[in-house]
Amino acid sequence: MGFNSSRGHVKTSGIPKWLVALVDISLVNLGLYFAFVFVTGDLQGFQLEPLFLLLPLLSLATVLLFNNLGLYSRQLSGMMPVVRSLLTGVIGLAVFSALFAFWTRAFIFQQGVFLAAPVIQLVLLIGWRFLYWRLERWIHGQKKLLVIGSHDEVEQALEKLMCLPRGVFEVIKVIGPDKVDEFSEWLPGADAVMIAGSLELEQKNRVIRESFDQSREVLIVPDLYEIILTRAMITQVHDTPVVECQDMQATFSQLFIKRVFDLAMAAVMAVPALPLMLLLSILIKSTSPGPVIFSQERVGFRNRIFTLYKLRTMIDHAEDQSGPVFSTEEDDRVTPVGRFLRATRLDELPQIYNVLRGDLSIVGPRPERPYFVQLFQEEMPEYNLRHLVKPGITGLAQVAGHYATNTRDKLRYDLYYVSDYSLLMDFRIVLLTIPTLINREAARGLNKEALGRLTWPKS
């Protein structure tokens, strides 16, 4: 759903998602057909029967895989995240097709098809998705955005808006909490309203009510307690409706299923990880003095302290002088090999052992050091709620944010994960981790350069 100011604030739904999925399915199947023709020169009779069996299954796998990779969600971040997800998707479909051929003993002499098909499918899908992205941008147009919040909160919001492709939003006015009365004057000229931070309850109600009255879109950066309420249920006490806030702790059955999932994933990951870690260990040892494995105390499930293992990416004794500090993008303590390991997340491989021991899950909030946990809890008392589940190797904050995403935003993602946990969510996060691994921006340290480029609209 969106607005286009040139159309008098009329809501435009854009291209239906079912149509997008239908085109995706058609191009995936067409890419497989082209691959057969390219490799074999023709579709011979003995190949048609297994092909007809594969295409419906491939169509279903396309929708399920692409949906879990977020390819049918609203896209505001440009084409590169879409390309990374498409790359992950076509690789997954290639593996699925190869397994199907192996199980059915079909295409036994056509291995080249499974190499050519992903390339052709990726080219077709990227071309279609670029066209779709441009059409969506044309349909919705540039939205004139009215931003409400305190200076620090709005500054963080504007920094994120600057990362979006040019032409998505135009900020026409920034209003502080003490000047919400000016909101009504600026609303007619806006397409959307962003509540970037904490407002008094009555102020927030007024902004939302007036925005809806004039059919304006409302974007809200939620308070932490509002994320906790996502698991709440509407019930009643006699004839009064009340919101029932349920316990955020996972049930025994959820914990059991999650543990089985963790052990299965860790066992599969350990097979390629062991020889790779041996090779990386030799590389680390030959280029930098010190141990190969770096260990550190972290806070885990229900505040239990455990030892986390990683491949060393910094010089030995890196914090002897500075004490506990976060790494920055230009951190000279990181070794050349360490930069590669961080960019590819290969430094996390030893944590498979932590999963097998039960310290970590495959998916969960990233564990933090006791020193920082204490600091964060003093600033944000809700921080302790992220320890109601086991920490993980990957998590929602890691696939949705970057290394440099601020702690409060990461906590928003973590609390959403805790409050709405399911095995399906774990599966989706594992899938989304794959395109994240090829996103260098996600692994970079803190960078304040963008903040200095901010230009504030004139009052």
Image (cartoon, rainbow, N blue to C red):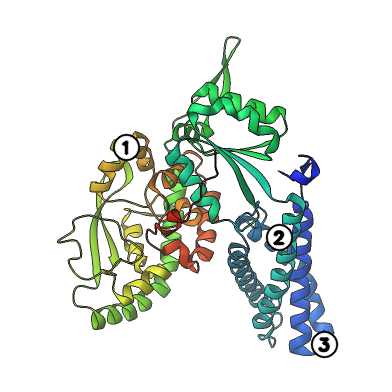
* Residue type, numbered disc 2: Trp
Instruction: Identify the residue under disc 3.
Output: 42
- Where residue 311 sits in the image (x, y, percent)? 30, 69
Q: Earlier in the sequence, mark 1 or mark 2?
A: 2
* Residue corresponding to mark 2: 133
Dot 1 falls on a residue whose secondary structure is: helix
| Quadrant occupied by the C terminus | top right
Q: What is the spatial separation of the Cα atoms under label 3 and label 2, in whole angstroms?
A: 34 Å
Q: Residue at x 70, y 33 (%)?
A: 188
Quarter of the figure that contains the N terminus: top right
Mark 1: few, some, or many residues within 10 Å (few <14, many ≥20)? few
Viewer can see residue 307: yes
417 left or right, relative to 192: left
Question: Which of the pair 215/80 is nearer the observer?
Answer: 215
Rendered location of residue 426, percent (x, y): 50, 52
Q: Residue furthest top?
A: 238
Viewer-nearest residue: 217 or 191: 191
Mark toward the start of the polypeptide (3 vs 2):
3
Q: Farthest residue in the front direction?
A: 458
Q: Residue placed at 74% from the left, 52% from the top?
A: 17
Instruction: Please tell me whether mark 3 sits on a helix, a strand or a loop.
Output: loop
Report the amino acid beneath label 1. Answer: Glu
Q: Which residue is mark 1?
A: 379
| Disc on the earlier residue, 1 or 3 | 3
Whole-percent x and y of residue 135? 76, 58
Which mark is drawn over residue 343? none
Q: Is residue 233 visible?
A: no
Query: How far separated are the C-alphas under marks 1 and 3?
Result: 67 Å
Seen in the picture, residue 48 relative to 175 is either above or below; the reply is: below
Q: Secondary structure at mark 2?
A: helix
Position of 338 relative to 153 (above/below) = below
